[in-house]
Image (tube, helix red, strand yellow):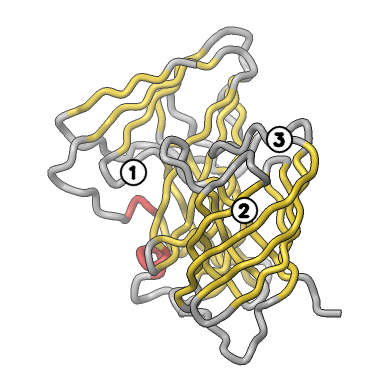
């Protein structure tokens, strides 16, 4: 795959057309995922659209994004209740940043090759001052050339700006999670200002985690030491002596930690940890 970044003098405007959800119109295959990530002292929705070339020949895909990372994807949030589905928010409503250069990313994909397009949007920007906190179905559409108008359903996430810091709930215990072929179980001790613990991991032969963790194979020991500020944690994990990534997270509720491994070149690699029931 070839990557070419070109600085443009003008901001690229959103121009994707839309169709009914689930109607493919190209030989590109698409899948989407969304997750909650910590963003400073707040929360953000991290959207990923994976595009696969289903043609027998190489194809080139390009998209623009501004200095805030916006423009590559169109994200919509829907309220789903009682069998009805109504749009509540559209990222096309977000104002573009003025005075910042837009870049053009270009990927040439061989047959069967794939690329991932990412975009992060603050939860506060989605809810604004008019939408209620709660579950929203999120969809993702590529803003690319050639156009890929398919609106891909990603997932349903609970969006809230509220600080989740339950003082009466014991957060210490066993937390488990998996992502891209790597699973882990870690016993975490939570205090008012720290989170520490140790456990085990298992990395399959098909491990595609990224963020520097692609070399993990088999089983081993994982440890974590981080600082806590209410419902946010930030620190470092150690997978034996093989991989030592920064790890940050934010509580979605008292039993769910939306976390991510970080890297300079690959951005966040999300993983959700869930607290096991107390025995």
Which one is closest to the eye, mark 1 or mark 3? Answer: 3
- Residue at the disc numbered 1: 69
Residue 200 in the image: state x and y as whole percent.
76, 54
Q: Earlier in the sequence, mark 1 or mark 2?
A: 1
At horizontal 60% and vertical 20% (from top left) the residue drawn is: 113
Q: Earlier in the sequence, mark 1 or mark 3?
A: 1
In the picture, the disc for residue 271 is: 2
Q: Earlier in the sequence, mark 2 or mark 3?
A: 3
Which one is closest to the eye, mark 1 or mark 2? Answer: 2
Whether residue 109 is situated above or below residue 141 in the rendered picture:
above
Contact between marks 1 and 2 (CB within 8 A): the answer is no
In the picture, the disc for residue 207 is: 3
**Front residue of this view, candidates 199 and 12:** 199
Task: Characterize the local packing of mark 2: few (<14), some (14-19) or many (20 or more) Cα atoms within 10 angstroms.
Answer: many
Element class at badge 3:
loop
Element class at badge 1:
loop
* Cα distance in 3D space between marks 1 and 3: 27 Å
Task: Characterize the local packing of mark 1: few (<14), some (14-19) or many (20 or more) Cα atoms within 10 angstroms.
Answer: some
């Amino acid at each position: 795959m070839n990557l070419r970044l070109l600085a443009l003098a003008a901001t690229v405007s959103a121009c994707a057309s839309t169709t009914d959800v689930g109607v493919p119109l190209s030989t590109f295959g698409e899948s989407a995922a969304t997750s909650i990530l910590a963003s400073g002292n707040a929360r953000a929705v991290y959207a990923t659209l994976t595009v696969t070339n289903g043609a027998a020949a190489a194809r080139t895909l390009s998209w623009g994004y501004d200095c805030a990372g916006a423009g590559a994807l169109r994200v919509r949030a829907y309220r789903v209740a009682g069998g009805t589905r109504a749009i509540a928010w559209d990222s096309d409503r977000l104002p573009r940043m003025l005075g910042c250069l837009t870049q053009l990313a270009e990927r040439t994909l061989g047959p069967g090759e794939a690329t991932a397009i990412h975009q992060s949007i603050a939860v506060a920007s989605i809810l604004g001052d008019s939408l209620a906190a709660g579950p929203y179905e999120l969809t993702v559409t590529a803003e690319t050339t050639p156009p890929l108008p398919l609106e891909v359903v990603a997932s349903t996430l609970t969006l809230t700006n509220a600080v989740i810091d339950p003082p009466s709930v014991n957060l210490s215990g066993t937390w488990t999670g998996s992502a891209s072929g790597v699973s882990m179980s870690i016993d975490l001790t939570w205090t008012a200002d720290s989170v520490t613990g140790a456990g085990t991991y298992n990395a399959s032969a098909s491990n595609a985690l990224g963020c520097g963790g692609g070399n993990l194979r088999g089983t081993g020991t994982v440890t974590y030491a981080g600082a806590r500020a209410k419902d946010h944690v930030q620190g470092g994990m150690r997978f034996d002596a093989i991989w030592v990534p920064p790890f940050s997270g934010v509580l979605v509720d008292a039993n769910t930690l939306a976390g991510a491994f970080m890297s300079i070149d690959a951005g966040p690699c999300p993983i959700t940890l869930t607290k096991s029931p107390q025995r």
